[in-house]
C-alpha cells in the first residue's frame, strides 16, 4: 500500500538515471532503489491495472513505483469522454495498491523526459501500444529512443471501457435492482428475489 499520497518520498542530489539495458545487465544503483514511473487515468481501478503495476514492481529487485494520475480536466480535454471516478477517487484507489509506493498528480496527459528526470525516475512503464500526439507521433517514442521505457503487458478481457459497456448493456437491470432495494431494503430484496424464483 502507498505510504506517500501525493508526495515524493525519495529525492537525491546527484541523480543519474539507469537505462533499461543497464538494469537488465545487472547494473543497479547501490545507494537507492530502482525508480520506475507509471502514469495513466486508472478509472474504475481494476485487476488489469493491478497486474500492470505488479509487473512494474517485480521487473527488478528493489523497485520503487511512482504512479502519476491524470487530472479530470486533462482526461476530458484529450480523451473527450466523461470519467466514472474523480481524480481524488482515482488517486485514493491506486494508493491502496500494494505494488505502489507513491501516487502523484503529475500535471500532464503526455509524459516527457523532463518529467521523468524531475521525478528522478530511471524508467517509465507502459504497454507497447503507440499513444500518438495530435501529429501522430507516439508520445513514448522519446523514452524508447533513450532506452528508458519498460514494456508491460495488458490483461486481455478487462478494461475500463469494457466495464462501462457491461454496465450500459445491463443498465435497466441495475436500475430495477436499485429501485427494489429502495422499496424492500436488502433483506426484502433477497426475499422478493427468492419468491419470484419459486413462483
Image (spheres, helix red, strand yellow):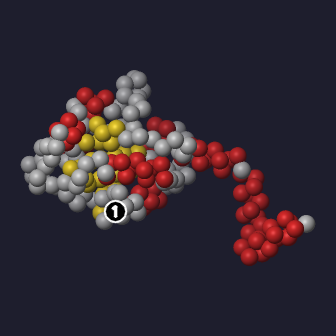
Is 155 located above or below residue 195 in the figure? above
Q: Nearer the viewer, residue 19 or 70?
A: 19
Give the residue furthest to the left.
Answer: 14
Q: Residue at x 80, y 74 (%)?
A: 191
Is 126 located above or below residue 92 in the figure? above
Q: Residue at x 23, y 52 (%)?
A: 61
Quadrant of the drawing holding the C terminus: bottom right
Q: In the rendering, at what x and y percent does residue 138 appear?
A: 37, 28
Q: Quadrant of residue 27?
A: top left
Q: Nearer the viewer, residue 75 or 163?
A: 163
Mark 1 lies on residue: 2
Q: In the rendering, at what x and y percent does residue 14 appear?
A: 8, 49
Q: Nearer the viewer, residue 84 or 2?
A: 2
User: Horizontal placement of 93 versus 61: left or right?
Assistant: right
Q: Quadrant of residue 150?
A: top left
**Can residue 184 be seen in the rendering of this structure?**
no
Q: Quadrant of residue 135?
A: top left
Is 192 located above or below residue 166 in the figure? below
Give the residue furthest to the right.
Answer: 199
User: Horizontal placement of 63 versus 172: left or right?
Assistant: left
Give the residue furthest to the front.
Answer: 25
Q: In the rendering, at what x and y percent does residue 115 appear?
A: 25, 42
Quadrant of the drawing holding the N terminus: bottom left
Q: Nearer the viewer, residue 34 or 104?
A: 34
The residue carrying pointer 1 sits among few (fewer than 14), some (14 to 19) or many (20 or more) residues within 10 Å by Cα, namely some
Q: In the rendering, at what x and y percent does residue 91 appear?
A: 41, 57
**Can residue 191 be seen in the rendering of this structure?**
yes
Q: Residue at x 48, y 44 (%)?
A: 155
Amino acid at each position: 500500500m502507498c505510504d506517500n499520497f501525493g508526495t515524493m518520498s525519495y529525492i537525491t542530489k546527484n541523480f543519474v538515471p539507469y537505462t533499461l539495458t543497464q538494469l537488465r545487465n545487472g547494473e543497479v544503483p547501490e545507494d537507492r532503489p530502482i525508480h520506475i514511473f507509471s502514469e495513466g487515468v486508472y478509472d474504475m481501478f481494476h485487476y488489469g491495472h493491478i497486474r500492470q503495476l505488479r509487473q512494474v514492481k517485480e521487473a527488478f529487485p528493489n523497485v520503487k513505483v511512482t504512479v502519476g494520475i491524470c487530472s479530470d480536466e486533462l482526461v476530458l480535454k484529450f480523451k473527450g469522454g466523461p470519467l466514472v471516478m474523480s481524480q481524488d477517487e482515482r488517486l485514493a484507489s491506486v494508493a491502496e495498491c500494494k505494488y505502489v509506493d507513491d501516487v502523484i498528480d503529475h500535471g500532464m496527459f503526455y509524459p516527457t523526459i523532463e518529467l521523468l528526470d524531475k521525478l528522478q525516475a530511471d524508467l517509465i512503464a507502459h504497454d507497447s501500444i503507440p499513444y500518438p500526439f495530435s501529429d501522430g507521433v507516439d508520445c513514448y517514442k522519446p523514452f524508447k529512443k533513450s532506452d528508458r521505457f519498460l514494456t508491460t503487458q495488458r490483461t486481455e478481457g478487462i478494461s475500463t471501457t469494457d466495464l462501462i459497456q457491461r454496465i450500459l448493456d445491463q443498465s435497466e437491470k441495475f436500475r430495477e435492482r436499485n429501485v427494489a432495494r429502495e422499496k424492500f431494503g436488502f433483506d426484502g430484496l433477497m426475499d422478493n428475489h427468492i419468491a419470484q424464483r419459486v413462483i
